[in-house]
Amino acid sequence: MSKRLVEVFTAGCPLCDETVKLVRELACPNCEIQIYDLHSESDTKSYQEKASQYGVYRVPSVVVNGKLAECCQQKPVSREALIAAGIGQG
């Protein structure tokens, strides 16, 4: 049986740390966990490229075997959505 690759994208914040903790608690011996801190200074560019390939727009996000987990599938922040929320409406 091949290992399940679980990739967690973080920014080193407390909310991200909670997600990493949860993933580690849930992981079984068949799970290989990779943590990518998009805020760290080590290899950030390749981490960001990988996140972009998976469609990661928010952190924390979890990718399992190359697929962004359903709970992490969100659209990026957009100008239109911010205006609709009332930003810049005087």
Image (cartoon, rainbow, N blue to C red):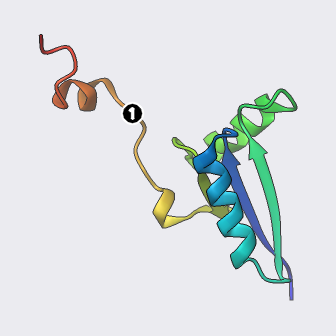
Q: As drawn, is 38 to the left or to the right of 16?
A: right
Q: As drawn, is 59 to the left or to the right of 35?
A: left
Q: As drawn, is 76 to the left or to the right of 31?
A: left
- Name the residue furthest front: 14
Q: Quadrant of residue 81?
A: top left
Would you name the residue on which mark 1 appears?
A: 77
Residue located at (70% from left, 55% from top): 8
Amino acid type for the residue under numbered disc 1: Val
- Name the residue furthest left: 90
- Check the image and report above or below for 25 versus 37: below
Q: Quadrant of residue 88?
A: top left
- Check the image and report above or below for 90 versus 49: above
User: In the picture, which quadrant includes the N terminus?
Assistant: bottom right
Residue located at (72% from left, 43% from top): 50
Residue located at (73% from left, 58% from top): 7
Query: What is the number of callouts on the image?
Result: 1
Residue located at (46% from left, 55% from top): 73
Q: Position of residue 15 (x, y in %)?
A: 58, 49
- In this orientation, which residue lies closer to the viewer: 55 or 34? 34
- Check the image and report above or below for 41 versus 73: above
